Amino acid sequence: MIRHVSLRMLLLPSALLLAALENQAPAADAPKPNMVIIFCDDLGYGDLACYGHPTIRTPNLDRMAREGQKWTQFYVAASVCTPSRAGLMTGRLPIRTGMCSSHRRVLFPDSAGGLPGEEVTIAEVLKSAGYATHAIGKWHLGHLPQFLPTSQGFDSYFGIPYSNDMDRAAESPRGREAFWAPKAEYWNVPLMRGTEIVERPTDQNTITRRYTDEVVRLIQESKDRPFFIYLAHSMPHVPLFASEQSAGGSRRGLYGDVIEEIDWSVGRVLDTLVELNLDKRTLVVFTSDNGPWLIFDQHGGSAGLLRDGKGCTWEGGMREPALFWWPGTIRPAVVRELGSTLDLLPTAAKLAGAAAPADRVLDGYDLSPVLLGAGTSPRETVFFYRGTQLYAVRKGAFKAHFITQPAYGPGKPEQHDPPLLYHLDHDPGERYNVAEKYPEAIAEIRKAVERHQAELVPGEPQLDKTL
Ligand code: MG
């Protein structure tokens, strides 16, 4: 028993030690915590002030980082929208759920597929524990009624069901021209409430504000019952839109306006929780689905010191800012351990006292010991898939790339044997291949790949089905 108590704890006065131990898990009779996951679209690792951006202001996100936990090695399940979101929703790699393809990288308005109904979502897990469940914003896991949030465990849905750059209108300027001075009417995207289209084209100028109003209203209405809110902003995916109130306010230009408006939105959510005395009973998580879309020049974000961005398996494509805020319960810290959006379902299940699905393989781990200051992250490995192919694997500090490929464009996959190897603690920017120096690290990673592939059962592909 004593082996599990750190030296630091042994040195604590006994009253503090008791408090530290009591802090390990919420008391059995404590009310179930509310949960809010705020999920951005194409936000880069380097786009927030608290992650080092020199000119974008994010005081509310900085507050989350200061009062909660800021994770520096937090990953997503894929480098593009649909498979990344499927990973968060299910705690399973997209290869298992069929939500990836080597042909189409995401779902489109002509897609007939979506997240299969037999998958168990985080909303279904929390609903089974008595939560009210609401999805707001971008869904991108199938826009047909049987795939929409209201068929996947959510009581309500309000948002644009896929990317905000889809459904190009005939009058839209061609190519990228439309993005440099975007107008809402260039994209004929629907805004849905439940399964009904309530506006088309969506006035994207006000979309971040309207999502926020919806969340504030839902929090006010749900305050007597535990709730789970999934707020998936359509921004900062191009085309970029900021409201009148935010436009022109940032030194970073339009992209900065968009991020600062998201930060304003985060502030409204936190303030609402504080006003209603719910802040000490609510976990708020902030992260994004994939890295910055660098091919959109200044309309794309920044991965900071990480290499490349959205669409590839370099760090910039799949490592994201991640903030966890729950005053009084989460131990404030900068966390340098490994975490993933795949871990949110098992973590939420644990905190809610709900059962995570036991009849299938989950790729996520319960991170609550780290959040509660009671232990270390159980995650040691990160798999970097592109479509249905495993391109790279991180184990501990080392990451091996077996295949690399430019994020976009005609560049073909390039095989590496031995793999390229990077020591991410020494070299987070993946600049110096150290494969010759650490053959044992490559051997370890190869073993992890063998174990993973031996138990892998790919799901029926969903992304290539068209209407
Ligand atoms: Mg995205």
Image: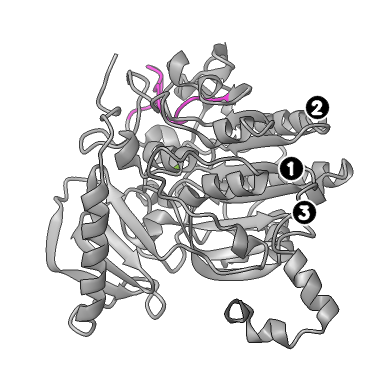
Query: Can you identify the residue that label 3 sits on?
Result: 27
The percent coordinates of residue 201 (x first, y second) are 52, 18
As drawn, the label of residue 32 is 1
Q: Earlier in the sequence, mark 3 or mark 1?
A: 3
Asked if disc 2 is less than 8 Å from ligand 1, the answer is: no
Q: Amino acid at mark 1?
A: Lys
- The nearer-to-camera label among 1 and 2 is 1
Taking depth in this image into account, of 156 and 238 the one nearest to the observer is 156
Question: Could you tell me how far apart the alpha carbons at marks 1 and 2 are, in whole angstroms?
Answer: 17 Å
As drawn, the label of residue 221 is 2
Q: Residues within 10 Å of mark 3 (few under 14, many from 20)?
A: few
Under tag 2, what secondary structure? helix
Using the rendered view, name the quadrant where residue 20 is placed.
Answer: bottom right
What is the magenta range? 159-174
Colour scheme of the picture: one colour
Q: Amino acid at mark 3?
A: Ala
User: Any magenta on residue 171?
Assistant: yes
Taking depth in this image into account, of 290 and 397 the one nearest to the observer is 397
Question: Could you tell me how far apart the alpha carbons at marks 3 and 2 are, in whole angstroms?
Answer: 26 Å
Residue depicted at x 47% and y 32%: 120
User: Any magenta on residue 166?
Assistant: yes
Residue depicted at x 21% and y 51%: 454
Quadrant position of ligand 1: top left
**In the displayed structure, does residue 212 sit left or right of residue 98?**
right
162 lies above or below 295: above
Under tag 3, what secondary structure? loop
Tag 3 near tag 2, CB within 8 Å: no
Using the rendered view, name the quadrant where residue 335 is placed.
Answer: bottom right
Residue depicted at x 61% and y 50%: 286
Taking depth in this image into account, of 362 and 405 the one nearest to the observer is 362
Q: Main secondary structure of the magenta part?
A: loop
Under tag 1, what secondary structure? loop
